[in-house]
Image (spheres, coloured by chain):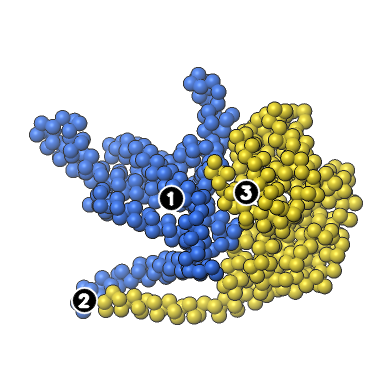
Amino acid sequence: MRRRDFLMSAAGATGVMAGLAPMSRRALAQDRPFTFTSWGGALSNAEKEAFIDPFGKLKGIPVINTSPTETAKIKAMVQAQKVEWDLVDVGGRTVWQGGKEGFLESLDLAKIPNAANLEKGWVSPYGVATSTGATIIAWSKSAFPEAGPQSWADFWDVKRFPGARGLYKYFYYNYEAALLAAGVKRDEVFPYTTEKADMALAKIKELKPHVTVWWGAGAQPPQLLSTGELALSSAWSGRMLAAEAEGAPVGHTYNDGIAWANWWVIPKGAPHRDLAHEAIDYALGKDQQAKLLSLKTYGPVLAAATEGADAETAKILVMNPDNVKNMLILNEEEANKYSYEYEEKWNQLMLG
Amino acid sequence: MARRHIETLLLLAPAVIFLFLCFVVPLARLFSLAFTDEAGPFATFAILADSDVYRRVMVNTFLVALAVALITVVLAWPVAYILTKLKGFWFAFALYGVLFPFWISVLVRTFSWMILLERNGPLNRFLINLGITDKPLALLFNDTGVMIGMVHVLLPYAILPLYGAMLRIDQRLLMASDGLGAGLFDTFRRVYFPLCLPGLMGGATFVFLLSLGFFITPALLGGSNAITLSMLIASFINDRLAWSLAAAASLVLLVVVLALLAATAKVLPFGKGMYAK
């Protein structure tokens, strides 16, 4: 046997194996229990305890909680027709990407009656928000023992608030922060236009010499602020709250925060599609939403569920009317657009 | 067919089948993705050619890899030499010192460097106490941080091939050189160094190639400009969901690397480094 013959037979063997594989895969997908996938950490714990495990108990079915969630993985599963996740927690951008690229189920809102109680921005054709958080201004208490910056304009003010800054490594959140710092009114930040995006880029360029860290992982800002490496930074609310609960010398404000949600979506072709719809509806119930209050990291998406909160908890809830009136609600559909269209310009700015 | 050939074939078969199924087939499928863009088979390459960012990131990545390979080899040399001279307990101690970092995850090591290199971290406090500097040095979130982190992770890959090459050098050759009247420097330059070269080139090549794919270390220790090709490709896959673009970017990288290695192999005894005698 010459080398070529050998390779041919090896290729034949591959063909046989490739033919066998899809059958067993499909058989597996139907047998596996209802599977929910999220980000891990504090959020996954909250969702497991408040939503998914009680839902499984109610229905009398086994459920699986996994992490981490990944958009590219959902797309790959759908393309390979081997969907292992029935319900997935994703960032807002994925909801609109998935709708456009066709790897998410279009939701049947008749099966999710509780969605009608949410504010309009939290419901979309391909995903529904189930909990809320925010990108907020945070600071190191060693840099500002009294009071830190209270707005993005303060954050940009290097004379009043000197020190090293941290910002998120993509245009996401920074578009909003820069426009608010430039004095654009909250209700005029969206829809995004090229003029506004260019203005935001110029504003970020202005602050860039003072930004030492462009963070990508949520754990970075609380860590860098508590050691004093950074004086102030944008940060995810849940991470700051968790760090403060552990006694880290850091402070934060919800003023001028950019509120966002954790979105639930159903990958196209998920075997437990109907159960996934039911689970979304269940999570949006007032009792389930109120369960998030005691976890003190990510809050309910249902405004009515914040009523029962004590004064201390109310301070950390995005949907508390006293907080949300000072915040900007992130428009994920627009954010997806500028993220895509300004990727090259953003990277150019980063490369300097 | 001679029996010897059948034996050879059977012995080779497991590795060949494994490599074919688990490496060649997926790689071919990945690269075929590059030509599947809706706008035409070569649309992805046109996007890359137009992208100022892709070009600059490509150049940056190669320059960093080259610098890391150079620094690593220079640092590895004395370590490898000392390893050949040590015996017994001290040899084991030094060898485990080299190997130990292999067993700790890159992520953990990178986070450890963050803590060590901070402005208020132990290294800066030490330097200030010694009076070497009065203001903390910026060792983190810039190219210095990236270099320190990458060199640390990659050092064993340079030490081990170099140690192997040095160990195989017949000590009598050095004595002969000495006996023939060559000075210390001449013996090094004309006997010792050429015999180390295969190991040196092998180590440098390993380090260079591994550096090209670095991701976590530059992301955590680098500044805003520390975008590497692998980060850009990951962002094509995860954020932009443009898989054909990611495949094209990977294909271009592979072609450039192969061309570069082929060119280097002509100039330097690179081939020998991979399987030094």
Snapshot quadrant of residue B11: bottom left
Disc nearest the viewer among 1 and 3: 3
Check disc 3: other Cα within 10 Å, few if <14, some if 14-19, many if 20+. Answer: some
How far apart are the two marked residues, 2 and 1, measured between alpha carbons?
Answer: 44 Å
Check disc 2: other Cα within 10 Å, few if <14, some if 14-19, many if 20+. Answer: few
Please state which amino acid type lies under the numbered disc 2. Answer: Arg
The image quadrant where one finds the C terminus of chain A is: top right
The chain coloured yellow is A
The residue where tag 1 is placed is B212
Mark 1 or mark 2, which is nearer the start of the sequence?
A: 2
The residue sitting at 21% across, 35% down in the picture is B188
The residue sitting at 15% across, 40% down in the picture is B173
Snapshot quadrant of residue A253: top right
Q: Secondary structure at mark 2?
A: helix
The residue where tag 2 is placed is B3
Task: Between residue B260 and residue A118, name the one nearer to us.
Answer: B260
Q: Chain of mark 1?
A: B
The residue where tag 3 is placed is A170
Task: Between residue B212 and residue A316, name the one nearer to us.
Answer: B212
Snapshot quadrant of residue B196: top left
Whether tag 1 and tag 3 are in contact, CB under 8 A, the answer is no
Residue A41 in picture, x, y percent from top left: 68, 52
The chain coloured blue is B
Identify the residue at the far left of this view: B180
Please state which amino acid type lies under the numbered disc 3. Answer: Tyr
How far apart are the two marked residues, 1 and 3, measured between alpha carbons?
Answer: 23 Å
Disc nearest the viewer among 2 and 1: 1
Q: Secondary structure at mark 1?
A: helix
Q: Chain of mark 3?
A: A
Please state which amino acid type lies under the numbered disc 1. Answer: Leu
Task: Between residue A103 and residue B44, name the one nearer to us.
Answer: B44
